[in-house]
Image: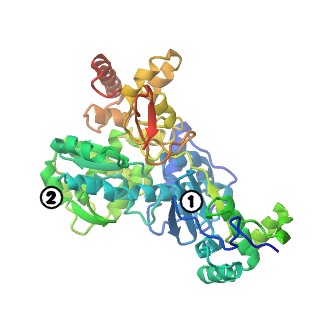
Amino acid sequence: MSKKTKDGSGRPRQRRDGLVVEQLPQETLVYDLERHKAHCLGVVAAAVWEACDGKRSMAEIAASAGRRAGQTVPLDAVWLSLRRLSRARLLATPVALPAARVGTSRREWLKKAAALGGLSVLSITAPTAAQAATCTTQTTCTGLQNRFCTGAPCCTTGPNPAPPGTICKKVGNQNMCSCAP
Amino acid sequence: MQLRTLAPTPPLGPGHEGRGRQVARVLRGAWREHPDADGLDAADLVGASPLLLRGGSAGLAWWRSRAGQVPPPVLKPLHDAFAVHTLQGAILEGKIPATFTRLHARGIRPLLGKGWAVARLYPRPGLRPYGDIDVYVRPGDEEAARAALDRPGEDSLPVDLHRGLAELDDRPFEDVFARSRTVRLGAADVRVFGPEDHLRLMALHLLRHGAWRPVWFCDLALMLETLPPDFDWACFMSGDGARTDAAVCAVRLAHELIGASLEGVPAAVRERTLPRWLVPAVLRQWGEARFEPHGTRTPMAVELRRPRGLLRALRARWPNAVEATVGRRARFNGLPRLPFQIGECLARTLRFARAQGGLAAPPER
């Protein structure tokens, strides 16, 4: 059975760069500043993620996550969480499933996840909230000639969200405005 | 808490106002640490969800309804909104100390209002979304402040820089500054408005924008229910009489619409009778799903180049009764609002035409 991450270390490491993390009582929220995606980790998934320091083995991760989550975390739960964390690109290197688990169908994974609970790694799509009366949508901004750039923050929600922290402004010699940092 | 079942669906009432009422019912008490979910109606939650998401009050709706037997598909988008707002708030919060450090380095003493200054009062981050950092500087400091914030080669900051005190410009800056409070945030000391000034600012700001976001009333409700013991109502009510009356109306509206407690509030505020048109006007605005708020509209100068959409653009700019009253500096009384709306529309058109002539002023939105 192979239990190696793709870098061959077999000891998964939590990704740290380019993430904003907010810990709430029942969930951990993670915003990926590079991909502009938000993720919501359940209690067990968050505990597994925290335990991935690049030094711990799978059994050690299970033990550490169990202590953090206040419940027994079996190896299956660790693998399920790692699979989901890896897909959400929250690990420094992707995790390769061990050979014995490669054949497991999606339905079986889901069954196991439902039985264990707290394993969810939900990717959140930004809701269509108009967060402030003073933001300019990216669509509006890029449709403006540079003399009309609003100078207001670009909306980070809606059908064409702009990256957070950007402003509708003239960039270089462009004729049209852009949402730029 | 038991949530009432989805069927039979109660009648919505007439159009936009009925939907606005659903929003109001869902948000009743939602700003509290332990909101009372009794009486929360699943049909209201389902019907109001798109409007709650749009207006930035979905997190509050989730906060109130999370303890109830709400079906997960109904709760999920509200929770997702809360999660996204929490993260966006964390990103913005991280930029506030840098903003103040840069301004302090230039000898500028700014004030922080709205946004984070009120979001920090809520029981959880993420319940009150905000999209920028509202900074108020003395009019003479504006140029230096812009230079400090837009330093080449450094991260730009999502700051909405206000020259002077905006809705509070009937008060001397020095007096408002003297009443401000310092809050430690990260590595910086951040100055926020004193509670009297901030409550008035929030009340007048929401009216100026036509009261379109229900979350602004939740702000007022929260502030009213967490006032410090030494809150000076005389200070809140000092200044221009028409503005004071407008601010009082906003406080009364927060009570009428979403049940803000008026305990400890002076009789002059508690007993202010609202004109009959006011509550329905705000509810209609809350229930208008296609409303394009100020700041998100395509500038009129651009709309004029594509006449096919002109009618829609003009309709989007028709001021509601609240906006027109504030824009025309009129009183919130029983007179019909149509003349004020027409007057405000004409005034905007004139401003736009002047701006087009000189291109000196920013385009009419």
**Image coordinates for residue A11, horizontal then vertical, percent:** 67, 74
Report the coloring of the rendering.
rainbow
Would residue B166 be found to the left or right of residue B292 on screen?
left
Q: Is residue A84 above or below residue B286?
A: below
Residue type at numbered disc 1: Leu
Q: Is residue B52 above or below residue A90?
A: above
**Image coordinates for residue A116, horizontal then vertical, percent:** 74, 74
The foreground one among B170 and B273 is B170
Say which residue label 2 marks: B178
Say which residue label 1 marks: B40
- Quarter of the figure with residue B75: bottom right
| Chain ID at mark 1 | B
**Image coordinates for residue A91, horizontal then vertical, percent:** 62, 64
| Chain ID at mark 2 | B
In this view of the protein, can residue B199 be seen by the observer? no
Tell me which residue sits at (69%, 63%) in the image.
Answer: A84
In this view of the protein, can residue B331 be seen by the observer? yes
Q: CA distance from mark 1 to mark 2?
A: 43 Å
Residue type at numbered disc 2: Ala
Task: Name the image quarter holding the C terminus of chain B.
Answer: top left
The foreground one among B89 and B155 is B155
The answer to whether the residue labelled 1 contacts the one labelled 2, judged by CB atoms less than 8 Å apart, is no
Q: Is residue B112 above or below residue A111?
A: above
Secondary structure of the residue carrying numbered label 2:
helix
Query: Of marks 1 and 2, which one's residue comes earlier in the chain?
Result: 1
Front label number (1 vs 2): 2
